[in-house]
Amino acid sequence: LVVLRARVMIKRAAVAEMANRVTGFVLMLAAVYAGFGLVGAATALVIGEVAGLVAILAITRVFVRPIPRVDLGAWRVILHASLTLGLVNVLGALVNRVDFFMLEQMASMEDVGVYGAAYRLPTLLERLPLLAMGTIYPLMSGLAARDPQGLRSVYHWTISRSALLAVPIVLVVSLTAPWIVAVWNGPGYEGAVTPLRWLIWSTGCMYVSVIASNVLIALGRVHGALGAWIVAAPANVILNLMWIPRYGATGAAAATAASFAIAMGISMWMAERHLSRAVRA
C-alpha cells in the first residue's frame, strides 16, 4: 500500500482497500445471518484482511516483488522511527479509549453505553482526513526533501481546506445531534446528545491536527508530533478525573474535545516552526 501511495496511484490503492473492506463486510453479514455469532463475524473480518493483502500483493507485483532478507542496519533505522511513531499512536489511542475505562470505574455502565453511542458518528467522520492523507502525504514527503517552500504552500492550502470542511461538519452535527441520536441509536439514548456535541469538536480539531502532524513527519520531526500527545494524553486523564465523577459521559466527551484541541494547537505551532526553519535553510 505504501508503494502505491508513494507512486501516487491512489485508484489502485483504493481497489486494494475495497477488496479488504467489501470482502470483510459481505462475509460478516453472511456470518451474522447464518447465526455464527461473534466468532463467525471476527473470522469474516480476518478473511477480509487476507483478501486485502492478496489484492495489494497482486497490484504491486508489477512494481516490486518482496524478497525476504536480513538487514540489521535497516531494522535499526525502522525500529528507531517506528518506536516514536508507535508512541504517537499509543498516546492517541489512550485519549480515545481511556475514557471508556474511567467511565466504567467512576460512573456506570449506562454512561459507557451512552458514550459509545455518541462516539459512533465522530469515529466514522474521522476516517475522511486519514484517507485524504494517503493521497497528500507522498506529495508532502517529496516536497520536504526538495522544496520546503512548496511544502509550506501545500500545508497552508491543505490545512485551510480541512478547516473549511471541519467547521460545517461540527455545526451541522451540533444542531442535528438529537435527530442523529434518535435515528442512529433509537429510544433510550437521549443522554448521548450532549456528549455527541462535545465529541464532534474533537473530530473538528483532528481534521486540522492530522495535517500538521503529517507535515512534521514528512520533515523528519516526529518528536514534534509526539510532543503534542505527550501533553494532550496526561491532560485527558486529569480532565477525566475532574469531570467524569460530576458530569459522567458528558464530562468524558468534554475532556476528549479539550485534549484534541491541545494536540491541535501544539501540532500547528510545531509545524509552522519547523517549516520556517526548513525554508530558511
Image (cartoon, rainbow, N blue to C red):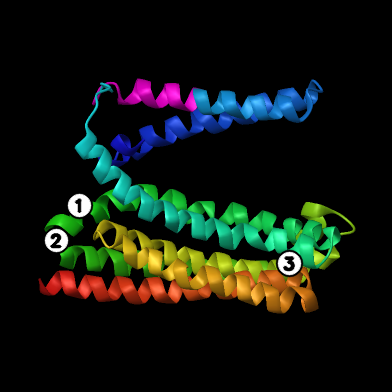
> In the image, what residue occupies the spot 50% across and 53% down?
128
Closer to the chain start, of discs 1 and 2, is 1
Closer to the chain start, of discs 1 and 3, is 1
Residue 130 located left or right of residue 84:
right
Q: Provide residue 62's location: percent of width, then percent of height.
A: 26, 22
CA–CA distance between discs 3 and 2? 44 Å
Dot 3 surroundings within 10 Å: few (below 14), some, or many (20 or more)? many
Closer to the chain start, of discs 3 and 2, is 2
Q: What residue is disc 1 on?
A: 142
> In the image, what residue occupies the spot 68% across and 54% down?
120
Instruction: Tell me which corner region of the image, top left, top right, bottom left or bottom right, holds residue 5.
Output: top left
> In the image, what residue occupies the spot 17% across and 64% down?
148
Question: Residue pushed farthest right?
Answer: 188
Q: What residue type is labelled 3?
A: Ala
- Secondary structure under badge 1? helix
Q: What residue is disc 2 on?
A: 147
Q: In this view, does 72 lie above or below 36?
A: below
Q: Where is the C terminus found, in terms of image quarters?
A: bottom left
**Depth order, front residue of 108/270:** 108
CA–CA distance between discs 1 and 3? 41 Å
Q: Where is the N terminus found, in terms of image quarters?
A: top left
Q: Which amino acid does label 2 sit on?
A: Asp
Residue 171 can be seen, yes or no: no
- Secondary structure under badge 2? loop
CA–CA distance between discs 1 and 2? 8 Å
Tell me where the magenta segment starts and ends, as one range: 51-64
Q: What residue is disc 3 on?
A: 177
Residue 60 magenta: yes
**Depth order, front residue of 71/13:** 71
Residue 32 located left or right of residue 231:
right
Residue 171 located left or right of residue 207:
right
